[in-house]
Image: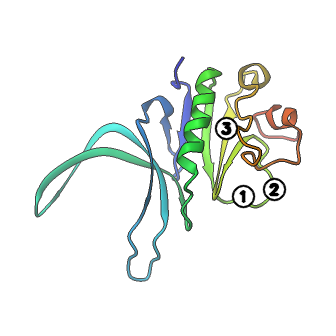
Amino acid sequence: MSLANVWLQQLDGSLVRADQATEITLHRTPELSGKSAHWLLTVSVPVPVGSGDPGGWRTEQLHRTLAQTSAPPTDAPVALARLLARLDAADAAGVVRADTSRVRHVPHPDHTLGAGEIRFGFTAFSGVEPRAALDGVVAPDEPGELTGEHRPRRAELAGSGAGPR
């Protein structure tokens, strides 16, 4: 099994295939004049990117930003890795997104997993039967892991598209 059919949605809306991500990182941006620092959740892909400075030319992996927050989402890398492992085990196909806008509001209708300031959601591609392919994928390891505790687990896993449930 692999994550070749699971895509990670970046902050700008672009997608990166999950099986291409080699590292999940969390880092703080520098504070600039008139602009406060913030935290970035990124994944690295094995593409060398170069940049030069007075010390010479450096290459490093390409980092793709999934989410930006004002507070450090320290649980986010582990929560994302856990979700990807579960999706891999289920041989899932769809899109994982990191949502910061509705974390403290109404539960998201798709499969979700909370990680502090970030909520990870998974939406299966149409034609994939979520009950068969995703049953148990986002079941919490710890009681507070899912942020939509008010809905029964079956309702949490029941659908993956837009529309009422």
Going by the image, does 22 lie left or right of 164? left
Cβ–Cβ under 8 Å for marks 2 and 1: yes
SS class, disc 1:
loop
User: What amino acid is found at the position of numbered circle 3 in the picture?
Assistant: Phe
Disc 3 crowd rating (10 Å Cα; few below 14, some 14-19, many 20+) is many
Q: CA distance from mark 2 to mark 3?
A: 16 Å
Quadrant in which the C terminus appears: top right
Q: Which residue is mark 1?
A: 102
Q: Quadrant of the N terminus?
A: top right
Q: Check whether the beta carbons of the residues at disc 2 and disc 3 lie within 8 A of each other.
A: no
Give residue 117's position: percent from left, percent from top.
63, 59
Query: Where does the image place residue 8, in percent across and percent down from the top left?
Result: 54, 39
Ranked by sequence position, the earlier of labels 2 and 3 is 2
**Image vertical order of residue 2 relative to residue 57, above or below:** above
Upstream in sequence: badge 3 or badge 1: 1
Percent position (x, y) of residue 110? Answer: 75, 40
Q: Mark 2: which secondary structure? A: loop
Residue wearing tag 2: 106
- Residue carrying label 3: 122
Amino acid at the residue labelled 1? Arg
Secondary element at image label 3: strand
- Quarter-wise, where is residue 126 in the image? top right
